[in-house]
Structure formats: C-alpha cells, structure tokens
Amino acid sequence: MASCLMCQKRLPRTLTIREILSWRKVTADTICETCKAAFTVINESKACPQCGRNQANQEICQDCQRWHLMPNTLKIKNRGLFQYTPTMHDYMHQYKFNGDLRLAKVFQHAVQLAVDAAQVDVVIPVPVSDTTFDHRGFNQSAELLQLIVENRHHPVVCPALKVVTRDKQQQSKQGRKDRMTRTQPFVIDPNYVEKLRGNKILIFDDVYTTGRTLHFAAQALQTVEATSLIGLTLAR
Ligand SMILES: [Zn+2]
Ligand SMILES: [Zn+2]
C-alpha cells in the first residue's frame, strides 16, 4: 500500500463504483488529506494584483511598489498558487534540497490547471544552473510542468531560458557586493527566438521570494516580442 510522500502515513485507497465501471485511469494520491490541508491556497481576490502575494486587499503591495521605482524593470504580473508557509517550506526542502523528485507529483495537477486557466501559448520554466542540475539531478520547476509535457501539445513547454555560465575565475573575482546585486543570470537559447515571437508566454518558477528571478527572466525574454508575458509560481 502506498504511503504519504510527506508524512509517510499509509494512504487509504478505495476505488469508487464509478471508477471501476468507467475504467477510468485512477490517479493515485501522493499525499494524505492531513498534509494536503496543511497547504494554504492563495485566493486571487485577496492577493496583490502584481505579484500574487496573499494579503487583506487587492492593492499593489509594498514589494511591488519598490520594484516600480527601480529603473528598467518590467511590470510583470505573477500568480502565486500557495502561500509560502512553514509547510510549503518543508515541502521545498524535501523536494529541492533533499532531491526527492517524487514530490513533484504532489503539485503537477494544480500547476496544470493554473496553466490552463492562464490561456497562454508557451510555458517557459525558470532554468537552474548546470552546477545545480548536476547536484540535484533535476530542474524543480520543469518537473512541476511534467503533466503538461506528457499529455498535451498546447501550451508548449519550452526550455528557452538558460543560465549564463560564468567560469570559476570570473566568479571568484566577484566581490560579495557583486554577488548580492546580481547581474542578469539568464539568456535566451537562440534556437527559440523565432518560435517565441508573437506568442503569449508564461514564465513558471517554483517560488517567488523577492521577485528578482522573475524580473530577470522577463527581461531576458524582452527581445522576443511576445504578445504577453506573465508569471506563475507554485509558492508566493
Ligand atoms: Zn501526510
Ligand atoms: Zn505585490
């Protein structure tokens, strides 16, 4: 019998009569009801309209107001699906830092529904560096989009962004301050530039923390002349 991927408790699994009669493919639950209930969904009517942060009203939040004051930043709109609560923190830790790839399954369906609702042509996962990929073995954002990749042709999931590779020597020459005020970490894979032109693009990332990653990704994609560019993150 399967157990919850988060708390290891055994999962009950009883087929309903309807499932048996319809021969419908049964997708097994990956986490138990208690663990599911511990995540907090962000209600769009109570979120910052710009970054998707959970709040009491629908006004642009202070984080976003600060972004607006920065030169050359795009006002990219983001939807966050779940609050970054201690439960989400634990999930991310187990998924990313312990590298438990099975945990991608927990949110693939929710991500698929949100991508459908966004009605875009192309979904671009935020990339991870080669070093992170080698260490972790997967890109956490790309894995959350796997259900769309497997079942659909629309929208297209397209790995159009790459992390700029800076050699070790360059990195060690950077002072601490330089690393803090990071420069653009992404480039577009030249193979995708033409394919992206005139499309509605959604950038997908696992977590929106400061918004810096999403802003950099949007900036890197500026030259492709997308019809629209929005963000979606699992957590905010
Ligand atoms: Zn559980
Ligand atoms: Zn905001």
Image (cartoon, rainbow, N blue to C red):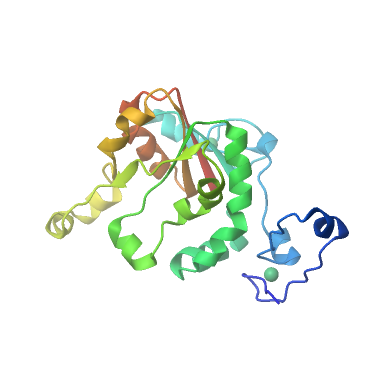
Outermost residue on the right side: it is 17
Please tell me which residue is depicted at 23% across the width and 49% down the height of the picture.
178
Please tell me which residue is depicted at 60% across the width and 54% down the height of the picture.
107
In the image, 137 versus 156, the foreground residue is: 156
Left or right of 180: which side holds 21?
Answer: right
Q: Find residue 66 and report its image quarter.
A: top left
Q: Is residue 71 in view?
A: no
In the image, 208 versus 161, the foreground residue is: 161
Q: Position of residue 56 (x, y in %)?
A: 68, 39
Q: Position of residue 164 (x, y in %)?
A: 24, 47
Q: Is residue 159 above or below residue 16?
A: above
Q: Find residue 118 and report its image quarter.
A: top right
Q: Find residue 104 and report its image quarter.
A: bottom right
Please tell me which residue is depicted at 51% across the width and 36% down the height of the picture.
155
Q: Is residue 91 in view?
A: yes
Q: Quadrant of ligand 1?
A: bottom right
**Quadrant that contains the N terminus:** bottom right
Tally the marks. Answer: 0
Q: Is residue 212 above or below residue 230?
A: below
Left or right of 42: which side holds 189?
Answer: left
In the image, 98 versus 103, the foreground residue is: 103
Q: Position of residue 31 (x, y in %)?
A: 67, 65
Please tell me which residue is depicted at 32% across the width and 35% down the height of the picture.
192
In the image, 70 versus 41, the foreground residue is: 41
